[in-house]
Amino acid sequence: MSNSNGTPSYGKVNSCLTRDAWLQLMCDREGEGLTRQPELQAHLEQCQPCRTIINDIRRFQTMLQRGKAPMLSTEQRQSLEDRVRLQAGNWSRPSVATPWLVWGGALAAAAALAWVLVRPLAVEHRRTNFDEALKAATLPTAENPGEGLAIGAVEGDLQVAGRDGLWQDLTVNGTLLTGQRLRATRGGRVTVPGRFELMLGSGSELELTTLHDRTAFVRLRRGEAECEVQKLHPGERFAVMFGGFRASVVGTRFAVLHTPQAGGVQVRVVEGAVRVDAADDPGAPLGETTTVVRAGQRWSHSAGVMALEPLASPQAALPKPLAGTETAAPVASCETAPEAAAAPSAHLHSPKAASRPAATDPGARQIVIQVPHQTMPPPEKVPALDKASAGDASPKGR
Amino acid sequence: MWLSALTGPEERGDADATDLALVAAYQRGNGNALSELYRRHGRRVESIARNLMGQSSELEDVVQEVFVELQRALFKFRGDSRFTTWLHRVTVNVALMHLRTQRRKGWLRWVGLDQVDALPAVVQQTEGRLEARDTCKQLYDILGTLPEKKYVVFALYELEGMSLEEIATTLDIGLNTVKSRLFHARKEVFELAQERGVLPPFALQVVK
């Protein structure tokens, strides 16, 4: 019984066991004894296929025993024993750290590492907070106006009102404080030496929202105003809020004129550049609608339409004479602004006078902003102004 | 000393107690206890590793590594099982680890006959030994075709001579699982040996 390969093939022949059964039987250790049982012996004597199977299985078992790998030699074994003995001499107790100790140590190490990494940031944050707190403590407010800015010169009939709402004449020896309001019945000008000049037209009023050694923010409540700002140094800011917009200038000397005009607001720039954006907060970041108006351009906003167009002529950008100031007489002179002190009334009375600083200073710039009365807040939203204006027809002495 | 008392013949229970005493001694810092454990069980460890790995030049290293592992793990041994069972399990694991490494790296576990011819004449053994070596190589070539689970059971039963119960305990598997793996392994090895003509020509006489 052999297949095509000559390999013997076994099957169940009559009552014979199959090859697998013989294999299982013979290979179990008690199987060899079974073959000595009389009935199996008798069967094997008569059955040649089964004898062949048994023969092959025994050859297989012999092969397994002969195929065993050799044991180590005596020398190898002695060498191995020496190695183990040497290894046994290096007895050391392994770490007996409990799991919670291991995890606790790992967490503590991670926390220490995190602290080392985050601490500089925390210190920086604390320092930043300290700086901000210091700045907030030193920045003047209406409640804590600080020392204010000394007035160098006052012209016209300017009046000033503090938190109490009482209007008083502005004098040359006074100071301008954060939160104060200025108004002019017929027109006037105040000079802060080295910083700026503010000229108010008749019936105009502005609020000094922030006055600081490096920051000056004013809000034109109504009327018209002209500002001459000295050259700004790095970190200094000057901005005028008007009708929901903000005109902030970064550069050298410039002038701002705010006059009423129907049909929206206008910014006319004669020299330099001014940045206009829709922001009511002077400290707000630049908005997406920031427009840079350069010399010789006019920016206007009317009925939701914004336009930037060239000026017809530079003279068109100059402010008109302030109404009602023809008879205004200067009440004080400015020692630190010689050009203004030399001809203060002319400066207020004529466009040429308004542009005189630019003419005398090569770096001077003039910017004209016109805002109609329609864009001003309604009178009921500024009760203090109305109240003060109605009940204080005549200026009070200081 | 107490070590000298271990050299005499012992019953199984006494042997287990002695092993536990040696383990406890090692845990207390007596390094000589490990040497004594090697003296008592080194031969068996070598035999198990040899039958699992076949003829290998790494046999010494494997035996030593078993005792290195033993040294590391001896502090965790609490006597929940017999020491020998635990030791045999460690031996099987270390040997299998070496086999896997060899297979992964494709190393030759054997010195091929073509290489034997190149050996100096004084090194070459007698024809009978070369024939035995050839048989051994062919056998482990066949065993190498088996899956690892069947391979281990076959080698431990047929070559190492462990009982089925001992294999089940050592490998921590059921007795029927051992029987099943052994049957299939035996069948596959037998068929492969016939196919490859490995069965030796000096077969026993046909039973009359």
Image (cartoon, coloured by chain):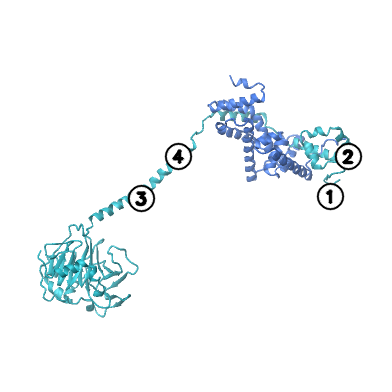
* Residue holding disc 3: A121
Q: Tell me the chain of label 2.
A: A
* Residue holding disc 1: A4
Q: Position of residue A19 (x, y in %)?
A: 81, 42
- Disc 3 crowd rating (10 Å Cα; few below 14, some 14-19, many 20+) is few
Residue type indicated by callout 3: Leu
Q: Position of residue A245 (x, y in %)?
A: 28, 69
Residue type indicated by callout 1: Ser
Using the rendered image, report if marks 1 and 2 lie on a common chain. Answer: yes
Q: Tell me the chain of label 1.
A: A
Q: Secondary structure at mark 2?
A: loop
Q: Colour of chain A?
A: cyan
* Residue holding disc 2: A47
Q: Are marks 1 and 4 in contact (CB under 8 Å)?
A: no
Using the rendered image, report if marks 1 and 4 lie on a common chain. Answer: yes
Q: Outermost residue toward the bottom? A: A312
Answer yes or no: is residue A20 visible. yes
Residue closer to the observer: A194 or B201: A194
Residue type indicated by callout 2: Cys
Q: Colour of chain B?
A: blue
Residue closer to the observer: A169 or B152: A169
